Image (cartoon, rainbow, N blue to C red):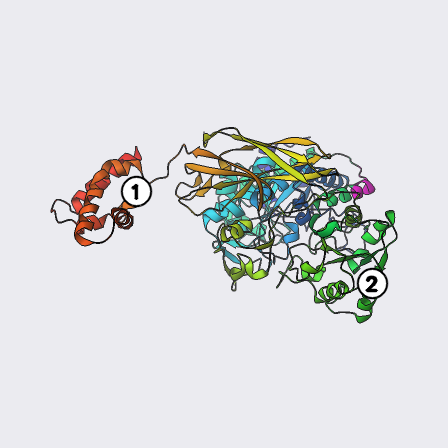
Amino acid sequence: MKMNIKKILKELTLEEKASLCSGADFWHTKAVERLAIPQIMVSDGPHGLRKNDEDSANPQEAIKAVCFPTASALACSFDRNLLTAMGKALGEECQAEKVSVILGPGCNIKRSPLCGRNFEYFSEDPYLASEMAAAQIKGVQSKGVGTSLKHFAANNQETRRMTVNERIDERTLREIYLAAFEGAVKQASPWTVMCSYNRINGYHSSQNKWLLTDVLRNDWGYDGLVMSDWGAVDDRVEGIKAGLDLEMPASFGKNDKMIVDSVNNGKLNMKALDKCVERVLKLVDKAEDSRNTCEWDMEAHHELAAKIAEQCAVLLKNDDDILPLNKEEKICFIGEFADKPRYQGGGSSHINSFKVTSALEAAKDFCKVEYAQGYITTEDKTDPKLLEQAVECAKYNDKVVIFAGLPESFESEGFDRSHMRMPECQLELIREVSKVNKNIVVVLHNGSPVELPFFDDIKGLLEVYLGGQAIGKAACDLLFGKAVPSGKLAESWCMKLEDNPSYLNFPGVGDEINYSEGIFVGYRYYDKKKMEVRFPFGYGLSYTQFEYSDLVISENEISDDQTLTVSCNITNKGKMTGMEVVQLYVGDKESSVSRPVKELKGFEKVSLRPGETKKVFFSLDKRAFAYYETAINDWFVEYGEFEIMIGSSSRDIRLSGSVYVNSKSKLPVQFTFNSTVGDVLSCSEGREVFGGFIEKICCSMFDSAVSGIGMDMAMAMIREAPLRGIITNDSRPEINRVWLQEMLDKLNAMLEE
């Protein structure tokens, strides 16, 4: 039965209202038995259910569950339907375990490959991150379970994460670090949003009114609940004022008392408190109203995890078509990860998997493989005996598959990486094996990009990221050709750490960090710099080949309130059924502000049989062409020609065309004495007011003051001059400051009409 929230609000005491704004313990909201308000449970996610086992003697032990691929892998699928399917599975598990809200997904931007929590985040690109997050949220919430979109916002490092102050300009925030959240909020309406630990421009996220109310609620229309990350609250009363509804976990009544005292002494308005309490009650009511009995099949979800992981893996190299493997050949697996795969990250998202399928186990379905451990993961130290065994194993086999990557000690929640290197013991293993066998495939298990000094010494490279508990099965299905790779990189791989745009400003000095690279994150930076990368954003190979053709752009010119339709044909020209991620990018050919060369604005994943052709459609609205203009506090499209690019990666553009987009709005302009001649002449009103007058003055000025240059050069020089220069360079008395001000007043009045 639904609660009468308006009635309950009137009956709650001040102390009860304050108590509802914090947790009862680590995982539950507070109940008010007097008014039949129940408590609900939240639990860690986001790629599996991490619920504490209440029957265990160890209070920290989690129940047995299924670990799905982490976000770093999931985003490489570029598949919304896949994320929704996983979300539904998580929703079923939550219902069965009486969990009302699962904490996730996380859609923070991958600013640096060093962030220790990158495995929990989708992408360097906000559009891809928002689409993946929205799809997962829709899946979970379709089962009557809430999500908590996190960590809002700009949680891009673990170093000093609870105290760091990030200096980020508003355009960068809006276009990069908030856009992923915006798309997910508007598309999927998560039940809750979780604020981050960090400060942004001096304000803790937990008490940042601009972030939690002005942007999230007023600009985006969000009407759900905002909760804190665990321990993120600084000043609870300021948090109430800013729009932080629920503090998690419990604060032993200390912050509740602070709320009560602040209301009593007039420092906190009761209306602000009531808003927070009402949103808490609405969440509890929705959760209880959505409660249903549900059973879930662990084995079925394990199989789903394998299917998902299969579509997330990215084939990065396949020289001489070394893959798929021929099971008639002699094959050896080398590396501890073949037997004990690293399939998830460390920290709050760590799942107590009910079982794990290794590649060594899964390979039995295809052929007999030899195995050598090769290295240990407990420390970065070469074991001579293990190395010798691995080299001997490699000598007498046709193909070698080395399972390598990053151990959990290299990346986890709570700390950042200090470099992009793999363990030296693994690098030494690959070097030594490559001396005795040239047919090497490396399978990488890692949450974030690594440097690849061995790249030229191997023929095959399969990136599986942290692919969940069934990654062994998925990897073998791909290695032996039962499945065809279809993943694409959701982040650029730079050649070396120093190439990354955040390199000079990560992780900051003390508690201060400047996001001085601005909007140029990931491929936006590498493309603008025309910089070589190891692998570009959106890159991934297949066992088959795809042809792009017949680009159709619905209009030659549109206004920014219209939708543009783009389509093209994709044909499978190979001999195997496969899936291709068709990516659409938009670039402003000429802009008055600095913009990326191209930005992802659409993608579709299509499955094609050999010889089959399908038509793919995209719809582009204003946001596909706009940048965030702080002068109007809104998105703005500058009139001009935009290039429409369709390709297989950000650097493999197969089709391109263009469209002219006309803006319905104008930017506010106020010309002054310091405005340049060129600025005035760039607008029609300026040319009308000053017209040939400026040109006449220019000619006179340069005839008398400059010799030996042509009119074009003279005009180029004068366009950079401030308007006040006209006065001092004209001998006529009527050309003075009063005259110039009158001209400017006339021009500015015309611009305001």
Between disc 2 and disc 1, the foreground one is 2
Left or right: where does residue 710 sit relative to residue 132? left
Residue 670 tag number: 1
- The answer to which of 31 and 510 lies nearer the viewer is 510
Q: Residues within 10 Å of mark 1 (few under 14, many from 20)?
A: few
- The answer to which of 110 and 88 lies nearer the viewer is 110
Where is residue 499 drawn, in percent x and y? 55, 59
Q: Which span of residues is magenta-colored?
A: 295-303
Q: Quadrant of residue 198?
A: bottom right
Residue 297: say if magenta. yes
Mark 1 belongs to which amino acid?
Answer: Gln
Viewport quadrant of the C terminus: top left
Q: Quadrant of residue 497?
A: bottom right
Residue 270 tag number: none
Task: Report, in whole angstroms, how far the alpha carbon at label 2 lies from the one at label 1.
Answer: 75 Å
Q: Which residue is mark 2?
A: 395
Can the viewer see residue 17? Answer: no
Q: Residues within 10 Å of mark 2 (few under 14, many from 20)?
A: some
* Whether label 2 touches label 1, CB < 8 Å: no
